[in-house]
Image (cartoon, rainbow, N blue to C red):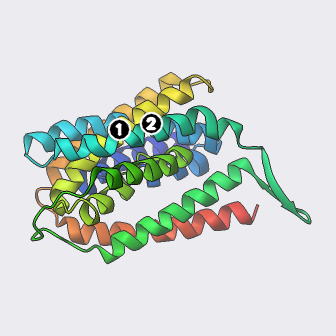
């Protein structure tokens, strides 16, 4: 095992740690880690990200549920339209995106480059949300009309399907702002949605991609250890300060991805 692989597996531990601490952000680390450090192409990386984040989030969901920090009904309400959109995106949309999107002079925007740039754009939005980091712990919970939840789930599900993200970094602010769920419960509830979305989305990939199971299962196992540690540490660390710091890191990563993709 060379130094790059060791760093990759350490990164897997950090992915789980971040998921356990803030309920999202796993894919923000997983996709760049797989693409830029371990050398996987973005299509494979986004598929592996779905499995890693989905399996890790499943473990985190059980931990958060035991603490009473999961709103199951709201989570499932978001999950249904989301997993439909994620599966269809991974099964039909992503495989049918043309290899070359467009060309301007000597510059050609390829499918892989386009996915990474779109990924960085979503990261930028997530970073802004986390840096602002509005906390609604004292806001009373009020239910919105289900059709709004359905449309929101479809939109986020399609986005997360394209970029191979579990969507926790999108669902946490969505649950806080749209469903009026307090931050700590939003973190726990997002893990249900991330689990369902990611694993069903990955099923769409199994039918179109060749999966390197040995690597993927080891990477995922290490990430699961990370989320167990993260859930434990979340009891002692301010989630508000942590989300703001991670938001700044996400902003830097988004800029880096755009630089890497456009400077090649």
Please tell me which residue is depicted at 19% across the width and 42% down the height of the picture.
Answer: 73
Q: Front-most of 1 and 202?
A: 202
Q: Position of residue 38 (x, y in %)?
A: 58, 43
Would you say 114 lies left or right of 163 here?
A: right
Q: Which residue is mark 1?
A: 80
Q: Is residue 87 above or below residue 4?
A: above
Q: Front-most of 34 and 77?
A: 77
Res 93 → quadrant: top right
Residue most extreme to the bottom: 132
Q: Is residue 37 above or below residue 141?
A: above
Q: Which mark is residue 125?
A: none
Q: Which residue is mark 2?
A: 84
Is residue 39 visible in the rendered image? The answer is no
Would you say 160 lies left or right of 139 here?
A: right
Q: Position of residue 104 (x, y in %)?
A: 87, 65
Q: Position of residue 6 (x, y in %)?
A: 47, 41
Q: Front-most of 75 and 144?
A: 144
Are the residues tagged 2 and 1 within 8 Å (C-beta)?
A: yes
Please tell me which residue is depicted at 50% across the width and 36% down the height of the picture.
Answer: 48
Q: Is residue 236 above or below residue 196?
A: below
Res 40 → quadrant: top right
Judging from the image, what secondary structure is the residue with disc 1 in? helix
Near mark 2 (Cα within 10 A), the count class, few <14, some 14-19 or many ≥20, is some
Please tell me which residue is depicted at 43% across the width and 31% down the height of the picture.
Answer: 200
Judging from the image, what secondary structure is the residue with disc 2 in? helix
Q: Position of residue 180 (x, y in %)?
A: 20, 63
Q: Front-most of 176 and 225?
A: 176
Near mark 1 (Cα within 10 A), the count class, few <14, some 14-19 or many ≥20, is some
Q: Quadrant of the C terminus?
A: bottom right
């Amino acid at each position: 095992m060379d130094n790059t692989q060791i760093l990759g597996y350490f990164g897997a531990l950090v992915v789980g740690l971040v998921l356990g601490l803030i309920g999202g952000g796993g894919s923000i680390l997983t996709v760049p880690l797989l693409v830029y450090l371990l050398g996987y192409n973005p299509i494979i990386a986004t598929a592996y990200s779905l499995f890693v984040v989905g399996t890790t989030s499943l473990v985190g969901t059980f931990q958060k549920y035991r603490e009473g920090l999961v709103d199951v009904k709201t989570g499932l309400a978001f999950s249904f339209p989301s997993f439909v959109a994620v599966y269809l995106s991974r099964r039909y949309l992503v495989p049918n995106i043309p290899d070359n999107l467009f060309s301007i002079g000597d510059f050609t925007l390829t499918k892989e480059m386009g996915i990474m740039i779109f990924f960085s754009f979503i990261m930028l939005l997530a970073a802004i949300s986390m840096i602002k980091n509005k906390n609604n712990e004292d806001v009373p919970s009020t239910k919105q009309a289900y059709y709004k939840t359905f449309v929101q789930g479809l939109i986020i599900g399609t986005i997360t399907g394209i970029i191979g993200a579990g969507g926790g970094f999108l669902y946490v602010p969505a649950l806080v702002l749209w469903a009026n769920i307090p931050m700590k419960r939003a973190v726990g509830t997002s893990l249900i949605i991330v689990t369902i979305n990611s694993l069903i989305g990955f099923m769409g990939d199994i039918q179109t991609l060749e999966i390197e199971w040995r690597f993927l299962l080891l990477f995922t196992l290490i990430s699961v250890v990370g989320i167990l540690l993260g859930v434990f540490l979340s009891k002692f660390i301010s989630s508000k300060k942590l989300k703001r710091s991670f938001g700044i890191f996400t902003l830097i990563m988004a800029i880096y991805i755009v630089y890497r993709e456009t400077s090649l």
